[in-house]
Image: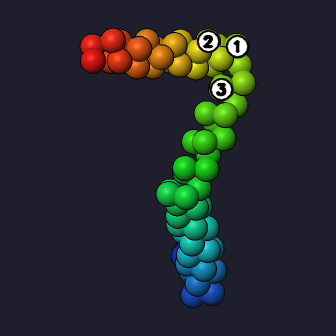
């Protein structure tokens, strides 16, 4: 029959599939590495903090913290 594969063809397909699966598993392991995830998050936050909008958010948050500290000391 024209649709039948030889044993060698099947073995090559299995080896290609195994290699592709191993590569996918390695990539997933690298993406989900907690250390790498944390490093990527820190880098992303640093980049956002350098934008005008990021600086505004940091300034507002800092001002809110100062107001909370001052209000806390006034209660004493």
Kindly report the distance in space between the C-alpha atoms of the residues bearing marks 1 and 2: 6 Å
Q: Nearer the viewer, residue 27 or 75?
A: 75
Q: Is residue 12 left or right of residue 21?
A: right
In primary-sequence order, the first of circles 2 and 3 is 3
Kindly report the distance in space between the C-alpha atoms of the residues bearing marks 3 and 1: 9 Å
Q: Secondary structure at mark 1?
A: helix
The answer to the question of whether label 2 and label 3 lie on touching residues, with beta carbons closer than 8 A, is no
Estimate the x, y position of residue 9 in percent, counting from the top left.
62, 80
Estimate the x, y position of residue 26 in percent, counting from the top left.
58, 67
Kindly report the distance in space between the C-alpha atoms of the residues bearing marks 2 and 3: 11 Å
How many residues crowd around disc 1 within 10 Å: few (fewer than 14), some, or many (20 or more)? few
Residue behind mark 3: 48
The answer to the question of whether label 1 and label 2 lie on touching residues, with beta carbons closer than 8 A, is yes
Q: Is residue 70 visible?
A: yes
Estimate the x, y position of residue 30 in percent, counting from the top left.
58, 61
Q: Secondary structure at mark 3?
A: helix
The answer to the question of whether label 3 and label 1 lie on touching residues, with beta carbons closer than 8 A, is no
**Which residue is the extreme one toward the left?**
75
Residue behind mark 2: 56
Q: Secondary structure at mark 2?
A: helix
Q: On the image, which quarter does residue 69 sit in? A: top left
Q: Is residue 52 left or right of residue 66?
A: right
Q: Quadrant of the N terminus?
A: bottom right
Tag shown at residue 6: none
Residue behind mark 1: 52
């Amino acid at each position: 029959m024209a649709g039948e594969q030889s044993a060698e063809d099947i073995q090559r397909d299995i080896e290609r599939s195994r290699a592709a699966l191993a590569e996918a598993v390695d990539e997933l392991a690298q993406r989900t590495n907690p250390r790498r995830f944390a490093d990527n998050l820190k880098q992303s936050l640093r980049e956002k903090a350098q934008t005008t909008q990021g600086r505004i958010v940091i300034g507002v948050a800092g001002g809110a913290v100062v107001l909370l500290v001052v209000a806390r000391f006034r209660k004493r």
